[in-house]
Amino acid sequence: MHTGFFTIYRRDMIRFIRFKTLLISSLVQPALWMAFFGIAMSASFNRLTMEIPTLPGVPTVDYLTFMAAGVIAMTTLFTSLFGGITILFDKNWGLMREIFASPLPRTQIIFGIALSGMTKSFIQAGIIMAFALLIGADLFAGFTPAGTVFAILGILLFVGVFSLGFLFLSAAISISLESPEGLQGIITLLTMPIFFASNALYPINAFPPPLQAVSLANPLTYLVTGIRYFAIGNNFQAVGTQYTVTPSAIGFAFLFLAGFTLMMFGLAWWRFQKAVVT
Amino acid sequence: MSGQIITVQELYHCFKEVVAVDGISFDVKEGEIFSFLGPNGAGKSTAINVLTTLLPIQEGRATVAGYSVADDPQKVRESIGIVFQDVTLDRDMTCREILEFHGNLYRMPRQERKRRIDELLTLVQLENKQDVRTKHLSGGMKRRLEIARGLMTRPRVLFLDEPTIGLDPQTRMRMWEYIKDVNREGTTIFLTTHYMDEADQLSDRISIIDHGKIITTGRSFELKNALGEDLIYLETSDLAGTREVLSEMEMVKEITIKPRGISAMLNGDGTKVLPSIMETLATRRIRVNVVNVKKPSMDDVFVHYTGRELRDEGAERASSAVTRAGRR
């Protein structure tokens, strides 16, 4: 196996750790989402949903716990979509020429950048989970220690596949563009529908049918489903909706994400083969 | 087995309507230092970008180290090293990290990588800057680091695109020495430059390139000899008269009017011709203010072949102005 991706990976991680502002902001930001948005929203939602009769025999999950999965997913989405920006900077500052003129296969560049982005997402997901627990979210409630470890691994698996998919997409866009501003514009365009047409913050069963269809084709929905399955359980109710997840549904969610990621890799591969950097 | 390490046939490259390389053909012999000499915008960097596989080949054929640039780019990349024209260093990595990264790109084994980095850092005198981030280096240091990087992998062919641009004279000399050392150890050097002295000092052979075409190729002394043996430069009270006098002399091969004087290329020894020139000028009552006899430089060679002066960056307009003045 070619290990050239590790060279790219290491450099990107060195830069991540070295830029203190970038490092700290990327670590603090997800915690801030939980702290402000999470607490504010959960206060409102909990008050609003108090009136809704609960289904007997189904464990109820408060809004903070419910949205923690959404915040992990959202952070992963943003971090991954921006992950390819390194490529754009390298291209604009001439650094990509050194790499493109070297014998390193271009797929290794894609892998290196994607894996470092995935690492960042893992770190952020860890921070959010820890912080969520700290401010009172009931993640992994009633799990055995072994069960908790298994759940965390499951979450990381979903986060990993999802982040790779969006990192490949980001890499494909970045290598095709000339300016970071362009990437910013495209990312803003993409994040809006992906984030809001999903089950990250609210149930999708109240959506009008077209929006529901969009959310069912949305990788973020499947990531959130996966995280909730591992962090909360396969049968719970929140925001007046019952969530039951069968193993086959989780399998489908994973396959959906894996398929999306493969497609995005194909896209990135194609863009990198086409790319000319001088 | 000193065959051709680079062969180029009818290479053509354009960017939209702009033709950057216009059907050039040349060979580089294994083990030599070969230069492309030409002004900015002559097509030197484009040619290098094609040969180093950064630009796809549009028309023509090229091989580097025995591999086709079009069909076997991966093999070409494994055989070459490059120093780019402008600085391509990550500002936030240290000198050692820059070299580490490069060695890793070429999959150098750890031990060899470390030894080579130590060796190169000493050579370019950056050993006590090895843990300094490149943004804190001076321009010359950055260039030295880049040259060290280009040499990391002991490539068969090292491409140097304007290697000593922006370096102080001392550093340039040391770079030249080092480039020669590397060459002596067996690396073929392909360099582009718009510095006459650089092409002259370093190269075994020089191609003069202008407007995407190779004007002429040869050894430095051959190019100079094509012009003549000596060059006489005169500033006098009557340039037209001087020109007349010179054009009547048998040994004068070519006359060029300069902004303030006149220069003549001679077939023979200038010191022997000069007295008779002075004598004739004296009989015509033309006063001589400045006189100079010298061997032709690469500058003169360039002017001779292209009809243009070769100037530093941003002097395009100035040089065309000189050409106009010369034609008058």
Image (tube, rainbow, N blue to C red):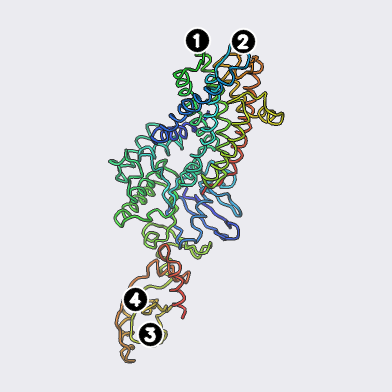
Q: Are marks 4 and 3 in contact (CB under 8 Å)?
A: no
| Residue A186 % position (x, y) | 58, 41
B21 sits left or right of B90 in the view: right
Give the spatial CA distance, label 3 vs label 2: 107 Å
Q: Amino acid at mark 2?
A: Val
Say which element carries label 4: loop
Where B156 falls versus B278 (above or below)?
above
Question: Considering depth in this image, is A114 or A85 the residue closer to the camera?
Answer: A85
Discs 4, 2: same chain: no
Discs 3, 1: same chain: no
Q: In front of the other: label 4 or label 2?
A: 2
Say which element carries label 3: helix
* Neighbours of disc 2 within 10 Å: few (<14), some (14-19), many (20+): some
Q: Which residue is mark 2?
A: A58
Q: Amino acid at mark 3?
A: Leu
Q: Chain of mark 4?
A: B
Q: Chain of mark 3?
A: B
Question: Considering depth in this image, is B142 or A80 the residue closer to the camera?
Answer: A80
Discs 4, 1: same chain: no
| Residue A187 % position (x, y) | 56, 39
Give the spatial CA distance, label 1 vs label 2: 24 Å
Q: Amino acid at mark 4?
A: Asp
Q: Chain of mark 2?
A: A
> Is residue B119 visible in this depiction of the protein?
yes
Q: Which residue is mark 4?
A: B269
Question: Considering depth in this image, is B159 or B99 the residue closer to the camera?
Answer: B99
Q: Which residue is mark 3?
A: B239
Q: Residue visible at 59% across and 39% down?
A: A189
Q: Which residue is mark 1?
A: A146
* Neighbours of disc 3 within 10 Å: few (<14), some (14-19), many (20+): some
Q: Amino acid at mark 1?
A: Ala
